[in-house]
Amino acid sequence: MDQKAIEELREKYIKNPPEGMTAKLVKNMTDSDLLDMHYFLSEDEDFDGEEEGFYIDLF
């Protein structure tokens, strides 16, 4: 991810910090920690609720 995208994510989470965090904590996070947090907060966004688990769509 480029630096501009990382800074946009940082601003997003500074304006609306995840539960249990503050804007100051987000501001002082390393880029790597910020990306990890974003990954874990957004990993279920594509989940449609049909099935849990791993599958490969061959079609």
Image (cartoon, rainbow, N blue to C red):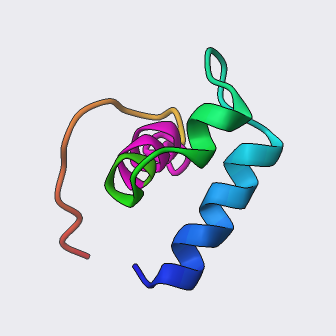
Residue at 46% from the left image edge and 34% from the top image edge: 50
- Residue 17 horizontal side relative to residue 58, left or right: right
Name the outermost residue toward the top.
Answer: 20
Residue drawn at 32 percent across, 30 percent down: 52
Q: Nearer the viewer, residue 45 or 27?
A: 27
The one of 16 and 50 positioned closer to us in this rendering: 16
Secondary structure character of the magenta stretch overall: helix
The vertical placement of 19 against 9, above or below, is above
- Left or right of 36 in this view: 18: right
Choose between 9 and 40: the one closer to the eye: 9
Viewport quadrant of the N terminus: bottom left
**Image coordinates for residue 51, horizontal then vertical, percent:** 37, 32
Residue 31 at x, y percent in the picture? 40, 59
Q: What residue span does the magenta drawing correspond to?
A: 35-47
List x then y, in percent, for residue 37. Answer: 44, 41
- The question of residue 22 being in magenta is answered with no
In the rendered view, would you say 20 is above or below 27? above
Vertical position of residue 7 compared to residue 13: above or below: below
* Residue at image location 69% in from the left, 46% down from the top: 13
Residue 59, by quadrant, is: bottom left
